[in-house]
Image (tube, grey):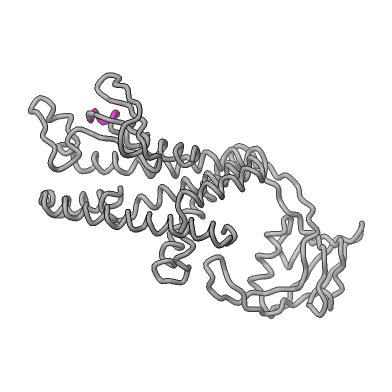
Protein backbone atom coordinates (compact mmCIF):
# COMPACT_ATOMS: atom_id res chain seq x y z
CA UNK A 1 0.00 0.00 0.00
CA UNK A 2 2.94 2.34 0.63
CA UNK A 3 4.02 1.92 -2.99
CA UNK A 4 0.53 2.66 -4.33
CA UNK A 5 0.17 5.62 -1.99
CA UNK A 6 3.54 7.02 -3.07
CA UNK A 7 2.68 6.76 -6.77
CA UNK A 8 -0.67 8.49 -6.18
CA UNK A 9 1.19 11.20 -4.28
CA UNK A 10 3.49 11.65 -7.30
CA UNK A 11 0.45 11.90 -9.57
CA UNK A 12 -1.27 14.53 -7.46
CA UNK A 13 2.03 16.35 -6.99
CA UNK A 14 2.15 16.86 -10.76
CA UNK A 15 -1.26 18.56 -10.72
CA UNK A 16 -0.35 20.53 -7.60
CA UNK A 17 3.02 21.87 -8.78
CA UNK A 18 1.81 22.99 -12.19
CA UNK A 19 -1.26 24.62 -10.64
CA UNK A 20 1.03 26.53 -8.28
CA UNK A 21 3.35 27.49 -11.15
CA UNK A 22 0.29 28.70 -13.08
CA UNK A 23 -0.80 30.84 -10.10
CA UNK A 24 -4.01 28.84 -9.67
CA UNK A 25 -5.25 28.81 -6.09
CA UNK A 26 -5.04 25.31 -4.57
CA UNK A 27 -7.46 24.82 -1.68
CA UNK A 28 -6.70 21.20 -0.72
CA UNK A 29 -4.04 18.61 -1.38
CA UNK A 30 -5.16 15.20 -0.08
CA UNK A 31 -3.53 11.80 -0.11
CA UNK A 32 -6.51 9.45 -0.03
CA UNK A 33 -10.26 9.95 -0.37
CA UNK A 34 -13.07 10.16 2.15
CA UNK A 35 -13.05 11.60 5.65
CA UNK A 36 -10.03 13.63 6.71
CA UNK A 37 -7.79 11.91 9.28
CA UNK A 38 -5.29 14.70 9.75
CA UNK A 39 -4.77 18.00 8.03
CA UNK A 40 -2.81 21.20 8.28
CA UNK A 41 -3.28 24.45 6.46
CA UNK A 42 -0.12 26.08 5.20
CA UNK A 43 -0.72 29.36 3.46
CA UNK A 44 -3.81 29.06 1.30
CA UNK A 45 -3.65 25.26 0.93
CA UNK A 46 -4.83 22.57 3.36
CA UNK A 47 -2.66 19.42 3.22
CA UNK A 48 -4.59 16.31 4.30
CA UNK A 49 -4.33 12.57 4.85
CA UNK A 50 -7.74 10.99 4.23
CA UNK A 51 -9.26 7.68 5.30
CA UNK A 52 -9.34 5.72 2.03
CA UNK A 53 -5.74 5.25 0.79
CA UNK A 54 -6.71 4.25 -2.75
CA UNK A 55 -6.53 7.63 -4.40
CA UNK A 56 -5.98 11.27 -3.78
CA UNK A 57 -6.93 14.64 -5.12
CA UNK A 58 -6.00 18.27 -5.55
CA UNK A 59 -8.87 20.70 -5.01
CA UNK A 60 -8.38 23.93 -6.95
CA UNK A 61 -10.48 27.05 -6.71
CA UNK A 62 -13.21 26.98 -9.36
CA UNK A 63 -12.41 23.43 -10.45
CA UNK A 64 -15.98 22.14 -10.16
CA UNK A 65 -18.68 23.59 -12.37
CA UNK A 66 -20.87 24.46 -9.39
CA UNK A 67 -18.06 26.25 -7.47
CA UNK A 68 -18.74 29.87 -6.64
CA UNK A 69 -15.75 32.17 -6.97
CA UNK A 70 -15.48 35.63 -5.52
CA UNK A 71 -14.65 38.43 -7.92
CA UNK A 72 -11.31 39.07 -6.21
CA UNK A 73 -10.21 35.46 -6.89
CA UNK A 74 -11.40 35.20 -10.49
CA UNK A 75 -7.89 35.57 -11.94
CA UNK A 76 -6.69 32.61 -9.85
CA UNK A 77 -9.68 30.37 -10.51
CA UNK A 78 -9.04 27.16 -12.46
CA UNK A 79 -12.07 27.56 -14.73
CA UNK A 80 -11.02 31.06 -15.75
CA UNK A 81 -7.62 29.94 -17.02
CA UNK A 82 -6.94 29.55 -20.76
CA UNK A 83 -7.68 26.08 -22.16
CA UNK A 84 -4.00 25.28 -22.76
CA UNK A 85 -3.12 26.09 -19.15
CA UNK A 86 -5.97 23.97 -17.75
CA UNK A 87 -4.97 21.11 -20.05
CA UNK A 88 -1.35 21.33 -18.86
CA UNK A 89 -2.40 21.23 -15.19
CA UNK A 90 -4.49 18.12 -15.87
CA UNK A 91 -1.84 16.47 -18.03
CA UNK A 92 0.98 16.93 -15.54
CA UNK A 93 -0.48 14.31 -13.17
CA UNK A 94 -0.12 11.39 -15.60
CA UNK A 95 3.12 12.82 -16.97
CA UNK A 96 4.63 12.86 -13.48
CA UNK A 97 3.83 9.16 -13.14
CA UNK A 98 5.42 8.38 -16.49
CA UNK A 99 8.46 10.54 -15.74
CA UNK A 100 8.82 8.78 -12.37
CA UNK A 101 9.13 5.49 -14.29
CA UNK A 102 11.85 7.05 -16.48
CA UNK A 103 13.80 8.08 -13.36
CA UNK A 104 13.45 4.62 -11.80
CA UNK A 105 14.56 2.86 -14.99
CA UNK A 106 17.50 5.28 -15.31
CA UNK A 107 18.89 4.16 -11.94
CA UNK A 108 18.08 0.50 -12.65
CA UNK A 109 20.12 0.55 -15.88
CA UNK A 110 22.87 2.63 -14.25
CA UNK A 111 23.23 0.21 -11.31
CA UNK A 112 23.14 -2.78 -13.63
CA UNK A 113 20.62 -5.33 -14.84
CA UNK A 114 21.29 -9.08 -14.46
CA UNK A 115 21.42 -10.34 -18.04
CA UNK A 116 21.14 -13.96 -19.16
CA UNK A 117 24.09 -15.03 -21.30
CA UNK A 118 23.54 -17.00 -24.55
CA UNK A 119 25.03 -20.20 -23.17
CA UNK A 120 23.31 -23.49 -24.02
CA UNK A 121 21.99 -25.57 -21.13
CA UNK A 122 19.76 -28.49 -22.04
CA UNK A 123 19.48 -29.59 -25.67
CA UNK A 124 16.10 -31.23 -26.20
CA UNK A 125 15.76 -34.47 -28.16
CA UNK A 126 14.63 -34.54 -31.77
CA UNK A 127 15.09 -30.82 -32.26
CA UNK A 128 17.06 -28.72 -34.78
CA UNK A 129 19.67 -27.97 -32.10
CA UNK A 130 20.31 -31.67 -31.47
CA UNK A 131 20.43 -32.42 -35.20
CA UNK A 132 22.94 -29.60 -35.75
CA UNK A 133 25.18 -30.87 -32.94
CA UNK A 134 24.84 -28.14 -30.33
CA UNK A 135 26.01 -29.16 -26.86
CA UNK A 136 25.60 -28.02 -23.28
CA UNK A 137 28.03 -25.20 -22.52
CA UNK A 138 28.18 -23.88 -26.10
CA UNK A 139 28.09 -20.07 -26.19
CA UNK A 140 26.35 -18.54 -29.19
CA UNK A 141 28.33 -15.50 -30.34
CA UNK A 142 26.82 -14.80 -33.76
CA UNK A 143 23.77 -15.67 -35.89
CA UNK A 144 24.14 -14.68 -39.54
CA UNK A 145 25.41 -11.07 -39.33
CA UNK A 146 24.02 -10.38 -35.84
CA UNK A 147 26.48 -10.33 -32.94
CA UNK A 148 24.95 -12.05 -29.89
CA UNK A 149 25.81 -11.09 -26.31
CA UNK A 150 22.50 -11.81 -24.52
CA UNK A 151 20.07 -14.72 -24.53
CA UNK A 152 17.21 -12.35 -25.46
CA UNK A 153 19.08 -11.21 -28.59
CA UNK A 154 19.47 -14.82 -29.68
CA UNK A 155 15.82 -15.74 -29.09
CA UNK A 156 14.65 -12.65 -30.97
CA UNK A 157 16.55 -13.72 -34.10
CA UNK A 158 15.40 -17.34 -33.82
CA UNK A 159 11.74 -16.47 -33.17
CA UNK A 160 11.66 -14.28 -36.27
CA UNK A 161 13.13 -17.02 -38.48
CA UNK A 162 10.82 -20.08 -38.60
CA UNK A 163 11.90 -22.54 -41.33
CA UNK A 164 14.81 -20.28 -42.32
CA UNK A 165 18.37 -21.56 -42.46
CA UNK A 166 20.55 -19.67 -39.98
CA UNK A 167 24.34 -19.63 -39.67
CA UNK A 168 25.40 -19.98 -36.02
CA UNK A 169 28.88 -19.23 -34.72
CA UNK A 170 29.50 -21.09 -31.44
CA UNK A 171 32.29 -20.79 -28.91
CA UNK A 172 33.06 -24.24 -27.46
CA UNK A 173 35.92 -24.14 -24.97
CA UNK A 174 38.40 -21.92 -26.84
CA UNK A 175 37.31 -22.99 -30.31
CA UNK A 176 34.91 -21.15 -32.66
CA UNK A 177 32.68 -23.51 -34.64
CA UNK A 178 30.13 -22.81 -37.39
CA UNK A 179 26.75 -24.57 -37.44
CA UNK A 180 23.76 -24.36 -39.73
CA UNK A 181 20.40 -24.54 -37.93
CA UNK A 182 16.86 -24.22 -39.28
CA UNK A 183 14.37 -23.24 -36.53
CA UNK A 184 11.17 -25.28 -36.48
CA UNK A 185 7.92 -23.42 -37.03
CA UNK A 186 5.84 -23.65 -33.83
CA UNK A 187 2.55 -22.18 -32.63
CA UNK A 188 2.78 -20.37 -29.30
CA UNK A 189 0.96 -17.66 -27.36
CA UNK A 190 2.20 -14.14 -26.68
CA UNK A 191 1.79 -12.24 -23.40
CA UNK A 192 -1.80 -11.42 -24.33
CA UNK A 193 -2.73 -15.04 -25.03
CA UNK A 194 -2.89 -14.60 -28.81
CA UNK A 195 -1.52 -17.40 -30.96
CA UNK A 196 1.47 -16.67 -33.19
CA UNK A 197 4.06 -18.60 -35.18
CA UNK A 198 7.69 -18.48 -34.06
CA UNK A 199 10.90 -20.32 -34.74
CA UNK A 200 12.34 -22.67 -32.09
CA UNK A 201 15.53 -24.78 -32.10
CA UNK A 202 15.06 -26.70 -28.83
CA UNK A 203 17.54 -25.33 -26.30
CA UNK A 204 17.31 -24.01 -22.74
CA UNK A 205 19.67 -21.52 -21.09
CA UNK A 206 22.42 -22.73 -18.79
CA UNK A 207 21.54 -19.88 -16.41
CA UNK A 208 24.81 -17.95 -16.48
CA UNK A 209 24.27 -14.22 -16.02
CA UNK A 210 26.28 -11.03 -16.03
CA UNK A 211 25.35 -7.67 -14.52
CA UNK A 212 25.21 -5.32 -17.48
CA UNK A 213 25.62 -1.63 -16.59
CA UNK A 214 24.77 1.17 -19.00
CA UNK A 215 26.71 4.42 -19.24
CA UNK A 216 25.09 7.67 -18.08
CA UNK A 217 23.89 8.47 -21.60
CA UNK A 218 22.94 4.85 -22.24
CA UNK A 219 20.88 4.73 -19.04
CA UNK A 220 18.93 7.81 -20.12
CA UNK A 221 18.26 6.31 -23.55
CA UNK A 222 17.28 2.88 -22.21
CA UNK A 223 15.05 4.44 -19.52
CA UNK A 224 13.02 6.33 -22.11
CA UNK A 225 12.88 3.32 -24.44
CA UNK A 226 11.72 0.97 -21.66
CA UNK A 227 9.10 3.47 -20.46
CA UNK A 228 7.79 3.85 -24.01
CA UNK A 229 7.73 0.07 -24.51
CA UNK A 230 5.72 -0.54 -21.33
CA UNK A 231 3.38 2.38 -22.09
CA UNK A 232 2.58 0.86 -25.49
CA UNK A 233 2.09 -2.58 -23.93
CA UNK A 234 -0.30 -1.05 -21.37
CA UNK A 235 -2.41 0.54 -24.11
CA UNK A 236 -2.38 -2.63 -26.22
CA UNK A 237 -3.33 -4.67 -23.13
CA UNK A 238 -6.36 -2.44 -22.51
CA UNK A 239 -7.45 -2.81 -26.13
CA UNK A 240 -7.06 -6.60 -25.92
CA UNK A 241 -9.10 -6.55 -22.70
CA UNK A 242 -11.93 -4.69 -24.45
CA UNK A 243 -11.69 -7.16 -27.35
CA UNK A 244 -11.96 -9.97 -24.74
CA UNK A 245 -8.67 -11.47 -25.91
CA UNK A 246 -7.23 -10.93 -22.44
CA UNK A 247 -9.53 -12.58 -19.83
CA UNK A 248 -11.37 -10.15 -17.54
CA UNK A 249 -10.22 -12.11 -14.47
CA UNK A 250 -6.74 -10.72 -15.09
CA UNK A 251 -7.96 -7.37 -13.78
CA UNK A 252 -6.65 -6.83 -10.28
CA UNK A 253 -7.13 -4.31 -7.52
CA UNK A 254 -5.10 -3.08 -4.56
CA UNK A 255 -4.84 -6.55 -3.01
CA UNK A 256 -3.18 -7.90 -6.15
CA UNK A 257 -0.84 -4.91 -6.29
CA UNK A 258 0.12 -5.51 -2.66
CA UNK A 259 0.76 -9.22 -3.32
CA UNK A 260 2.83 -8.54 -6.42
CA UNK A 261 4.79 -5.80 -4.65
CA UNK A 262 5.60 -8.22 -1.82
CA UNK A 263 6.65 -10.86 -4.34
CA UNK A 264 8.95 -8.44 -6.17
CA UNK A 265 10.38 -7.10 -2.91
CA UNK A 266 11.37 -10.66 -1.97
CA UNK A 267 13.07 -11.01 -5.37
CA UNK A 268 15.36 -8.04 -4.66
CA UNK A 269 15.34 -4.27 -4.79
CA UNK A 270 15.87 -4.10 -8.57
CA UNK A 271 12.78 -6.24 -9.18
CA UNK A 272 10.78 -4.16 -6.70
CA UNK A 273 11.72 -0.83 -8.27
CA UNK A 274 11.11 -2.18 -11.77
CA UNK A 275 7.65 -3.26 -10.62
CA UNK A 276 7.12 0.24 -9.14
CA UNK A 277 8.00 1.78 -12.52
CA UNK A 278 5.51 -0.49 -14.32
CA UNK A 279 2.73 0.40 -11.85
CA UNK A 280 3.56 4.10 -12.21
CA UNK A 281 3.26 3.84 -16.00
CA UNK A 282 -0.04 1.98 -15.68
CA UNK A 283 -1.37 4.64 -13.32
CA UNK A 284 -0.36 7.40 -15.73
CA UNK A 285 -1.80 5.71 -18.81
CA UNK A 286 -5.05 4.63 -17.11
CA UNK A 287 -5.67 8.19 -15.95
CA UNK A 288 -5.53 9.31 -19.58
CA UNK A 289 -8.52 7.15 -20.50
CA UNK A 290 -11.39 9.32 -21.82
CA UNK A 291 -13.63 8.57 -18.85
CA UNK A 292 -15.30 11.49 -17.03
CA UNK A 293 -13.70 12.21 -13.61
CA UNK A 294 -10.36 10.82 -14.87
CA UNK A 295 -7.77 13.20 -16.30
CA UNK A 296 -8.46 11.89 -19.80
CA UNK A 297 -12.14 12.75 -19.43
CA UNK A 298 -11.29 16.31 -18.40
CA UNK A 299 -9.01 16.62 -21.42
CA UNK A 300 -11.88 15.47 -23.67
CA UNK A 301 -14.12 18.17 -22.18
CA UNK A 302 -11.41 20.77 -22.85
CA UNK A 303 -11.03 19.53 -26.42
CA UNK A 304 -14.76 19.90 -27.00
CA UNK A 305 -14.65 23.37 -25.42
CA UNK A 306 -11.82 24.37 -27.78
CA UNK A 307 -13.84 23.21 -30.80
CA UNK A 308 -17.12 24.79 -29.65
CA UNK A 309 -15.43 27.98 -28.43
CA UNK A 310 -17.43 27.59 -25.23
CA UNK A 311 -17.60 25.01 -22.42
CA UNK A 312 -20.18 22.25 -22.22
CA UNK A 313 -23.24 22.94 -20.11
CA UNK A 314 -22.96 22.30 -16.37
CA UNK A 315 -25.77 19.75 -16.61
CA UNK A 316 -23.96 17.61 -19.21
CA UNK A 317 -20.68 17.74 -17.26
CA UNK A 318 -22.34 16.79 -13.95
CA UNK A 319 -24.27 13.88 -15.53
CA UNK A 320 -21.19 12.58 -17.36
CA UNK A 321 -19.13 12.76 -14.16
CA UNK A 322 -21.75 10.74 -12.29
CA UNK A 323 -21.62 8.13 -15.06
CA UNK A 324 -17.81 8.12 -14.85
CA UNK A 325 -17.89 7.64 -11.08
CA UNK A 326 -20.36 4.76 -11.47
CA UNK A 327 -18.08 3.09 -14.05
CA UNK A 328 -15.03 3.44 -11.81
CA UNK A 329 -16.90 2.09 -8.77
CA UNK A 330 -18.04 -0.94 -10.79
CA UNK A 331 -14.51 -1.49 -12.11
CA UNK A 332 -13.05 -1.27 -8.61
CA UNK A 333 -15.69 -3.64 -7.25
CA UNK A 334 -14.92 -6.12 -10.04
CA UNK A 335 -11.18 -5.85 -9.37
CA UNK A 336 -11.74 -6.45 -5.65
CA UNK A 337 -13.93 -9.46 -6.48
CA UNK A 338 -11.12 -10.88 -8.62
CA UNK A 339 -8.62 -10.28 -5.81
CA UNK A 340 -10.76 -12.05 -3.23
CA UNK A 341 -11.64 -14.90 -5.62
CA UNK A 342 -7.93 -15.34 -6.38
CA UNK A 343 -7.16 -15.66 -2.65
CA UNK A 344 -10.04 -18.08 -1.96
CA UNK A 345 -9.28 -20.37 -4.91
CA UNK A 346 -5.49 -20.17 -4.57
CA UNK A 347 -5.10 -19.02 -8.16
CA UNK A 348 -1.43 -18.15 -8.82
CA UNK A 349 -0.39 -14.55 -9.24
CA UNK A 350 0.06 -13.27 -12.80
| Rendered image quadrant of residue 236 | bottom left
Please tell me whether residue 82 belongs to the stretch shown in magenta. no
- Residue lying furthest right: 174
- Residue lying furthest top: 43
- Residue lying furthest left: 71
Look at 52% across and 38% down and name the residue there: 103
Q: Is residue 331 left or right of residue 123?
A: left
Q: Nearer the viewer, residue 151 or 276?
A: 276
Q: Is residue 30 left or right of residue 341?
A: left
Where 36 falls versus 308 (above or below)? above
Q: Where's residue 261, x and y in %?
A: 56, 46
Q: Where's residue 24, x and y in %?
A: 23, 30
Q: Where's residue 276, x and y in %?
A: 53, 44
Q: Nearer the viewer, residue 263 or 285?
A: 263
Q: Nearer the viewer, residue 296 or 117?
A: 296
Look at 65% across and 70% down and name the residue there: 159
- Residue lying furthest front: 344
Q: How many marks?
A: 0
Where 71 falls versus 194 (above or below)? above
Main SS of the magenta segment? loop
Q: Where's residue 283, x and y in %?
A: 42, 48
Give the magenta part as a residue range: 20-24
Look at 54% across and 70% down and name the residue there: 193
| Rendered image quadrant of residue 68 | top left
Q: Is residue 204 left or right of residue 4?
A: right
Amino acid sequence: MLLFGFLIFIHELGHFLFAKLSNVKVLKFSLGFGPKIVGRKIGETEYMLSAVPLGGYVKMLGEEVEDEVEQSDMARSFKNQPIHKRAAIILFGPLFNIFTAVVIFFFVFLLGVPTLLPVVGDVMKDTPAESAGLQKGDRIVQIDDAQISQWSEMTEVIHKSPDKLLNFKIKRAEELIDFKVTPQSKKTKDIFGEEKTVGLIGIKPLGDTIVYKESLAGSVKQAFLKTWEISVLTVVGMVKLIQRIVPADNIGGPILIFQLAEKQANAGFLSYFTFAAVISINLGVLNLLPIPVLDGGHLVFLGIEALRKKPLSEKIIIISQKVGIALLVMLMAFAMYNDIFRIITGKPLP
